[in-house]
Amino acid sequence: MTTTTPNPATVLRTAFQKSVANYWNTNQQDPVNLRLGEIDDLYHHHYGLGEYDPSVLAGPEETRDERIIKEMHRLETAQADVLLDQLGDIRPEHRLLDAGSGRGGTSIMANARFGCEIDGVSISEYQVGFANDQAEERGVADRVRFHFRNMLDTGLETGSRRAIWTNETTMYVDLHQAFGEFSRLLEFGGRYVCITGCYNDITGGPSRAVSQIDQHYICNIHPRSEYFKALAANNLVPISVVDLTADTIPYWELRAKSSVATGIEDPFLTAYKEGSFHYLMIVADKI
């Protein structure tokens, strides 16, 4: 698979996909991602896990926001580590896929940990270029490559991947199509790890807070049950399901106190605390 830029019409096949790509292509200077990544040149496009250090809110007022930003970045890097912990026995000869790779932070972390080859795919041409520049600057571009491709049709070889992950990206795709593609790409016994927000089926539909999140990010948050239906239909058998909701609330509480708050913090906190929205990690094996 090459990094040659294909015709956008072959990658962005629906009006929804085009709107999502446009959102990420035009939000290039979003401080939520950039200011955090500038701390160590590891740029993420996901949220954080774990308790924050309350001392960041104390001390000199003039450096308070700087401390908060640094702590938020620590929490989002911790989230990526939790995901990578679930990939299983990954060796340097294995090949992995980061489906919806953003600015590439988790892929770069995976290569540093495992020494293996990783392909990332994104429908944002800007994100792909940014991530490839990061890999080049770190001297790993020969093993970590990012491509302007659709995760529903990657063009990668059947059975070529030992592991695949999605980190807060499945709300942009049809789950049955995505998991069908991942099942095709995984070798027998290969591992799929998904961290995602999903709405609680018991509520009967997306709550007002969940709908606000959908509108803000131009996404389509799925019900919890749909994940397990789509996995089962595509020979992906869950071996672990972890509710991370309580672990992500501190991140959102800290972010609400930061200079990079966007106003979406309140809907996230409301949805999590009222139980209409869950933050799950699903680990499944290909059979």
Image (spheres, grey):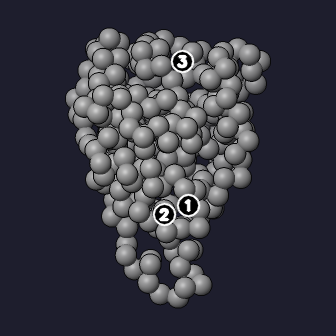
Instruction: Using the numbered discs, state the Cα–Cα distance from disc 2 to disc 1 in whole angstroms.
Output: 5 Å
Q: Position of residue 90 (x, y in %)?
A: 37, 35
Give the number of the disc on residue 256.
Answer: 2
Query: Which class describes the residues within 10 Å of circle 2: few (<14), some (14-19), or many (20+)?
Result: some
From what the image shows, is residue 274 above or below residue 125? below
Q: Quickly name the residue at label 1.
A: 261
Kind of residue at disc 2: Ala
Q: Nearer the viewer, residue 214 or 42?
A: 214
From what the image shows, is residue 70 above or below residue 21? below
Q: Quadrant of residue 9?
A: top right
Instruction: Using the numbered discs, state the Cα–Cα distance from disc 3 to disc 1 in whole angstroms.
Output: 32 Å
Q: Position of residue 159 (x, y in %)?
A: 44, 14
13 left or right of 240 in image: right
Residue at image coords 55%, 49%: 44
Give the number of the disc on residue 77.
Answer: none
From what the image shows, is residue 187 above or below residue 146? above
Kind of residue at disc 1: Ala
Residue at image coords 71%, 47%: 28
Q: Nearer the viewer, mark 3 or mark 2?
A: 2
Task: Give the quarter of the figure containing the C terminus.
Answer: top left
21 left or right of 188 in image: right
Question: For the residue labelled by badge 3, is the local secondary structure a helix, a strand or a loop?
Answer: loop
Counting residues from the start of the chain, the first of labels 3 and 2 encountered is 3
Q: Nearer the viewer, residue 47 or 158?
A: 47
Q: Please report contact status of discs 3 and 1: CB closer than 8 Å, yes or no.
A: no
Counting residues from the start of the chain, the first of labels 2 and 1 encountered is 2
Q: Quadrant of residue 128?
A: top right
Q: Position of residue 155 (x, y in %)?
A: 59, 15
122 left or right of 234 in image: right
